Image: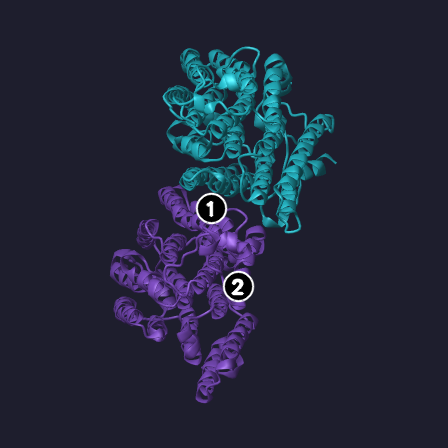
């Protein structure tokens, strides 16, 4: 039962997307939006139901990812191992452990909020937009749940098609160029990923004699260090494009600036998490020995990410670019947590993934609202937004403070745990990274406070007198985000306990 | 000796020859209407008898190549043509069938003399096909092609003569036997003949320093003939190359072929990145894909040959699909060479989707057969050892840049322009039929490729 419901859960959005695309479906924007919003909310509820009930089913199932994955995790959810389409030669199988369970809920949540938020930003080809968002959701759910490496890779590349169309069609006049950049970077990285996956496949065959692509059955422990290092480097180049790790980050700011607001939300909240998810699953889970050797270098890159992103964010004139560079900085912290190789650091990284997804989606939405109402994104030309839009100001403060890492908001827990993980790490270099990281966190407060100070405070120019405050659907999105941010900030152990049972 | 017992092995060739004869009779009475049906029936029957014939396991690969040649020429026959070609339908069909006949014989040839003869005859038939519309440009280009191709074939003949001097035979099998039995074999003796032969055959494939004719021909001749030239002769030459390399494959010869392949790929990428013309993009795509295929061929392991066969089967379909899309675009723009296809998708979503799937397949995206072919090809190449890793890294660089080339097409397709400026896409139903078949097969092989992969691996065991 659980197996079938997981499959239905993954492929339901595709059915919704196809339903929207059929010629019988109305071309009216209102109907399309209504259908999409109701469907997304139902899907989100389904994900919660599945999560609550699924945790009680079949606890004794031994065929779970944690057995191979890492000694720290204990899975509670059963494993789906479907032999659907087995004749391909590639074994299509889906399964969830704690991490992918969380990512699934996050995907459903962010998609729902994006669908609600896209009311004012999508002005053409409504059918194509909403169906592409649903196709993307299924692909993301597939990536987070599949256990077969080749299916993972196929979905990893497949995600580029809806993303390319979403960025290029609904973005501004420069969006086609930056969509091409996005695809080029990701496609280039994914070929290295393919190389790494094929090497794992062949090496596993050479070592164990079993030709399988299922990561639950692959064991790379007996492979020598040099080969593990080579494979790890290939994989990190592939995943690093998505994170993005320092030298591979060039696509991010342009893509965000030129994409439409809902697409930016999806990109920052979900697409960036794929890279970290891949690093946790493949590098951390399969190639533990190679990852241990590479960890100090990754930690250094993470610190560079944090500094570089924060410094660039501070000097941006465009508020959307500022938020985009802040993403690079935040993802650096996540990478620091993962590469510290401690249980706490891992919890912090996963916590910060979720926290950053919420804050980044919120920040991009706020920036979108401001850009739409005030017709400019230039930080020098905006001021006094708080006086004319108090509700927007209130929600914005919650989200911005969460991003800055203020206690009792979700961002604090993630940042704290990531750095704490680096402190307790057995590697000496990480203690140094932790010291640098703590000081750098001031920088993140600096650029975010600059945003608040320049945009929200100050005198309102005469030409902005007639601007409206947020509408109902925007209130719902920002309210939901703020609520979850405060909830996670006050009760962090809901997730931490769940990860470390 | 000739006997009627084994006539079934040549039945497909004989049927094509018979069809040519019937076409000549048609031309006496000017029966234009049945000429096309006759050609299609002849090709179809010959395909049927080719499949029905029993084949030696060691000849299975040339059998597969012949099947691919016949299927591709059958599909290309259904594409639209210029008005000039409609006027000379029967003449076109005769020349078309002639060139297919010689291609089948190239794929089957067992010695250098028959290979040379068939290549020359094919070049002659194709020369007339190129210059059929009698424009100054095409006449000049086809004349250039003829002169160059004769020169290149002369190189191949010189190489064969060298080999004859060394081994005493023109037959691939006997040369292979001689090399295997001779005690002091060194590749350095065979470098010059090998180089000459590769020069001659590489010209036909459009390998880097000799492949410039390909761009001019693609750009100037009728798109239907460009589609024909883009797959069928290369299939036949590859079939011959598998045999030739089987006789004299060593580490050094692999190295030379892979070097040629890499240069071709790099040239194609550099050429394609700055071109806006769809046909130039197809020429660049031909360079890039031939380079991948040559790398797999040059390694000459069982798995790499299997991946090469699979990649060919996939590439033929996607390529013809893309050409069908280009032809329909040209139709709607009054045969302009620079097909303008902005807003193609919004005007005709089904057609745009099919064309886009073919292009995306060439790119190697999931759900299309190009993706499976890409994974399979890289795994086949990687399987021959870690020493090949630099080659794979260059291949990856080529793939990354080729994304740029293909995505330019997709980008324009989704560009939005005012409704008035959009061209109405009028196309013949046969052309759409070819595009739909190619798209369907591209998707079908992307989802269920296992049967073809198994077939290719079975064939490659016996090479």
Real-space CA distance between mark 2 and mark 1, rounded to the nearest whole angstrom? 35 Å
Q: Position of residue A279 (x, y in %)?
A: 50, 29
Instruction: Check disc 2 and report the residue beneath it.
Output: B432
Q: Which chain is purple?
A: B
Query: Given the current orientation, which residue lies at the most extreme bottom position?
Result: B29
Q: Can residue A81 be seen at all in this image of the molecule?
A: no
Q: Viewed as shown, does residue A250 lie left or right of B462?
A: left
**Depicted A461 relative to depicted B456: above or below:** above
Q: Secondary structure at mark 1?
A: helix
Q: Residues within 10 Å of mark 2 (few under 14, many from 20)?
A: many
Q: Can residue B361 be seen at all in this image of the molecule?
A: yes
In this view of the protein, which residue sits in the foreground, B56 or A84?
A: A84
The colour scheme used here is by chain
In this view of the protein, which residue sits in the foreground, B141 or A6?
A: B141
Q: Position of residue B400 (x, y in %)?
A: 39, 43
At 50% from the left and 17% from the top, the residue drawn is: A386
At 56% from the left and 57% from the top, the residue drawn is: B440
In this view of the protein, which residue sits in the foreground, B197 or A148?
A: A148
Q: Viewed as shown, does residue A356 lie left or right of A38?
A: left
Q: Residues within 10 Å of mark 1 (few under 14, many from 20)?
A: many
In this view of the protein, which residue sits in the foreground, B305 or B80?
A: B80
Q: Secondary structure at mark 2?
A: helix
Tag 2, which chain? Answer: B
Instruction: Check disc 1 and report the residue beneath it.
Output: B379
Tag 1, which chain? Answer: B
- The N terminus of chain B, quarter of image: bottom left
> Looking at the rendering, which quadrant does residue B236 occupy?
bottom left
Q: Which chain is cyan?
A: A
- Residues tagged by mark 2 and mark 1 found on one chain of the structure: yes
Mark found first going from the N terminus, 2 or 1: 1
């Amino acid at each position: 039962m659980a197996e079938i419901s997981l499959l239905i859960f993954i492929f339901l959005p595709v059915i919704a997307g196809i339903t929207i695309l059929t010629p019988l479906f109305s071309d009216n924007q209102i109907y399309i939006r209504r259908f999409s919003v109701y469907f997304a909310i139902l899907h989100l509820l389904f994900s919660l139901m599945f999560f609550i009930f699924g945790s009680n089913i079949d606890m004794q199932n031994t065929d779970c990812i944690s057995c191979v994955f890492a000694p720290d995790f204990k899975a509670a959810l059963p494993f789906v191992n479907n032999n659907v389409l087995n004749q391909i030669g590639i074994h299509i199988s889906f399964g969830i452990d704690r991490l992918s369970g969380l990512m699934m809920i996050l995907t459903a949540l962010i998609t729902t909020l994006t669908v609600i938020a896209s009311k004012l930003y999508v002005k053409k080809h409504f059918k194509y937009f909403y169906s592409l968002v649903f196709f993307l959701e299924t692909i993301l759910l597939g990536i987070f749940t599949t256990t077969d490496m080749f299916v993972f890779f196929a979905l990893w590349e497949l995600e580029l098609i809806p993303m390319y169309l979403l960025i290029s069609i609904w973005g501004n006049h420069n969006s086609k160029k930056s969509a091409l950049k996005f695809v080029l970077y990701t496609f280039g990285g994914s070929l290295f990923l393919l190389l790494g996956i094929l090497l794992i496949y062949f090496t596993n065959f050479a070592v164990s004699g079993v030709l399988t692509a299922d990561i639950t059955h692959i064991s790379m422990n007996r492979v020598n260090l040099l080969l593990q290092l080579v494979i790890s480097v290939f994989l990190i180049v592939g995943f690093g494009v998505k994170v993005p790790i320092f030298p591979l980050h060039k696509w991010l700011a342009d893509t965000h600036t030129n994409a439409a607001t809902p697409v930016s939300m999806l990109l920052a909240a979900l697409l960036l998490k794929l890279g970290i998810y891949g690093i946790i699953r493949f590098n951390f889970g399969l190639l533990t020995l190679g990852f241990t050797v590479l960890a100090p270098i990754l930690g250094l890159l993470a610190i560079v990410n944090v500094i570089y992103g924060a410094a660039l964010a501070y000097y941006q004139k465009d508020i959307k670019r500022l938020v985009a560079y802040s993403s690079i900085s935040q993802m650096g912290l996540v990478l620091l947590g993962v590469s510290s190789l401690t249980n706490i650091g891992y919890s912090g990284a996963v916590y910060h993934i979720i926290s950053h997804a919420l804050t980044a989606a919120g920040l991009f939405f706020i920036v979108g609202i401001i850009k739409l109402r005030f017709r400019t994104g230039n930080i020098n030309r905006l001021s006094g937004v708080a006086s004319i839009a108090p509700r927007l100001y209130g929600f914005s403060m919650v989200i911005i403070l969460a991003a800055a890492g203020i206690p009792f908001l979700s961002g604090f827990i993630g940042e704290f745990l990531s750095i704490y993980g680096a402190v307790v790490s057995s590697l000496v270099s990480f203690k140094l990274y932790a010291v640098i990281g703590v000081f750098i966190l001031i920088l993140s407060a600096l650029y975010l406070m600059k945003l608040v100070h320049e945009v929200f405070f100050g005198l309102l120019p005469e030409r902005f007198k007639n601007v409206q405050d947020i509408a109902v659907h925007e209130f719902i999105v920002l309210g939901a985000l703020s609520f979850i941010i405060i909830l996670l900030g006050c009760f962090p152990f809901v997730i931490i306990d769940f990860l470390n049972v | 000796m000739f006997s009627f017992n084994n006539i079934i092995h040549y039945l497909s060739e004989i049927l094509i020859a018979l069809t040519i004869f019937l076409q000549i009779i048609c031309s006496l009475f000017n029966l234009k209407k049945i000429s096309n049906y006759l050609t299609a029936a002849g090709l179809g029957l010959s395909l049927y008898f080719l499949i029905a014939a029993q084949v030696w396991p060691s000849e299975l690969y040339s059998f597969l190549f012949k099947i691919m040649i016949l299927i591709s020429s059958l599909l290309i026959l259904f594409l639209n043509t210029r008005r000039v070609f409609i006027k000379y339908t029967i003449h076109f069909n005769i020349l078309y069938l002639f060139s297919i006949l010689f291609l089948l014989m190239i794929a089957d040839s067992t010695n250098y003399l028959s290979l040379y003869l068939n290549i020359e005859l094919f070049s002659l038939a194709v020369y007339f096909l190129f210059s059929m519309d009698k424009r100054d440009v095409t006449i000049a280009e086809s004349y250039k092609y003829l002169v160059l191709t004769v020169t290149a074939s002369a190189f191949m003949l010189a190489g064969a003569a060298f080999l004859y001097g060394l081994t005493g035979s023109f037959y691939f099998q006997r040369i292979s036997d001689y090399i295997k039995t001779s005690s002091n074999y060194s590749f350095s003796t065979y470098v010059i003949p090998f180089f000459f032969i590769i020069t001659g055959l590489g010209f036909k494939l459009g390998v880097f320093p000799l492949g410039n004719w390909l761009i001019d021909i693609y750009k100037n001749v009728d798109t239907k003939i460009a589609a024909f030239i883009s797959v069928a002769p290369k299939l036949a030459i590859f079939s011959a190359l598998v045999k030739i390399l089987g006789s004299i494959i060593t580490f050094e010869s692999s190295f030379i072929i892979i070097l040629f392949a890499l240069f071709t790929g790099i040239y194609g990428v550099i050429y394609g990145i700055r071109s806006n013309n769809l046909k130039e993009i197809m020429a660049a795509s031909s360079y890039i894909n031939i380079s991948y295929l040559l790398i797999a061929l040059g390694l000459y392991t069982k798995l790499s040959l299997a991946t090469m066969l699979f990649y060919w089967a996939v590439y033929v379909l996607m390529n013809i699909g893309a050409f069908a899309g280009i032809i329909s675009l040209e139709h709607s723009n009054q045969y302009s060479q620079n097909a303008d296809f902005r807003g193609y998708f919004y005007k005709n979503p089904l057609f745009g989707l099919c064309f886009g799937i073919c292009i995306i397949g060439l790119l190697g995206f999931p759900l299309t057969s190009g993706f499976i072919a890409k994974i399979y090809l890289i795994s086949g190449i990687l399987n021959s050892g870690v020493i090949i890793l630099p080659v794979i890294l260059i291949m990856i660089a080529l793939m990354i840049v080729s994304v740029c080339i293909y995505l330019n097409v997709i980008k324009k397709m989704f560009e939005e322009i005012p409704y008035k400026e959009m061209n109405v896409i009028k196309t013949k139903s046969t052309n759409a039929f070819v595009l739909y078949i190619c798209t369907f097969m591209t998707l079908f092989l992307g989802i269920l490729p296992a049967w073809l992969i198994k077939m290719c691996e079975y064939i490659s065991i016996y090479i």
